[in-house]
Image (cartoon, rainbow, N blue to C red):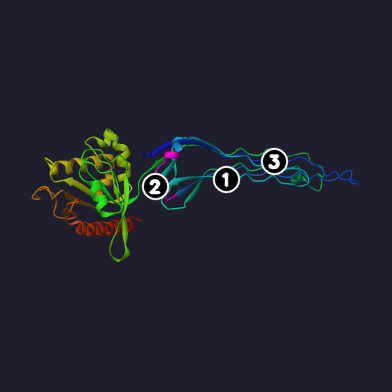
Amino acid sequence: MFIDFVKIRVSAGNGGSGCMSFRREKYIDKGGPDGGDGGRGASIILKANKSLHTLRDYTYRREYKAKRGQHGMGSDCHGKKASDIVLEVPIGTIVKDVGRDEILVDFTEDNQTFVVAKGGRGGKGNARYTTPTHQSPREWEVGLPGEKRELELELKSIADIGFVGFPNAGKSTLLSRLSKARPKIANYPFTTLAPNLGIVPYKDFFSFIVADIPGLIEGAHEGKGLGHQFLRHVERTRALAYILDITSDDPADELKTLQNELKQYSPALAVKPMVVVLNKTDIAGDEIDLGLAPEIKIIKISAVTGENVEQLKDEFFRLIKKAQELEENFE
């Protein structure tokens, strides 16, 4: 089961209260103030972990509460700070504060951390209030409350190349041909219900990541067929590979439909570097006119036999370099 959107509540720990105390020892009947400060409450921290690929764990537990700091004590003993809570999420997770409708952090690197709820500061003990004219202070502070938030966690896959196509176009077969990923493959639509990532080795020790996005259908931008859940993963790819089944009734019309769905969902998707891949040439002729502009590359392959797959890798590498140049120019 693939989970890519959850809501959770986090509550950081309150600070410990300061202490009001005076030194009392044998032969010292009027010692000075010695109340210690309270300890800081525990914070809640999110941390990216490249080994995670789903938000599933957060469906079982939706609320996280951190411990308060220890109260201050006499003899100038300060309260101990509570231990922070670290929650791990997959790379590609976007965290949003629901109350303020604000994106807090976008996790793009392994071990990246962000404090989503800060623990409350500990209160001052009465020893802090001593002055030359105020030798026996009885003032002390209550610890401050920790932050509380309701968060939305949304996972979007990060890949160099995203496979886009209708169900049963052969995307999963191509992924297994290019990489060591082993997605479920069957001869019926909607075999893939979650994005699958694969690392593709290339020349000179280079490698890149491809993502098999679950098959789209017409109306996906309106949420049909879990369209929104699938399209959000396309947003995080550098370039697109439109995978078309050459044996279908009208591959040209399918390509137009796919491009329209992506454009309707996000205009930015329409300008990503792209290649059109005609698959299943092993069982059908490859003579077909898609009516595309000359600058758009079309590669005819068979994911089953491996025909022209090496040529496709070369094109993927070219698209990635082009995407990198566009990113640098944008910055």
Instruction: Write the residue at 32% across / 46% down.
Output: 196
Choose top left, top right, bottom left or bottom right for residue 165: top left
Q: Can residue 288 be seen in this view?
A: no
Q: What secondary structure is found at the residue carrying circle 2? A: loop
Measured in 3D between alpha carbons, the distance from the residue under mark 1 to the one under mark 2, in whole angstroms, is: 23 Å
Left or right: residue 178 compared with residue 74: left
**What's under tag 1, amino acid-wise?**
Asp
Q: Name which of mark 2 and mark 3 comes first in the sequence.
A: 3
**What's under tag 2, amino acid-wise?**
Gly
What crowding class fits label 3: few (fewer than 14 Cα within 10 Å), some (14-19), or many (20 or more)? many
User: Which residue position is annotated with label 2?
Assistant: 92
User: Which residue position is annotated with label 1?
Assistant: 84
The disc at residue 48 is: none
- For the magenta stretch, what is the residue range? 49-57
Measured in 3D between alpha carbons, the distance from the residue under mark 1 to the one under mark 3, in whole angstroms, is: 17 Å
Q: Name which of mark 1 and mark 2 comes first in the sequence.
A: 1
- Residue at the far bottom in the pictured view: 204
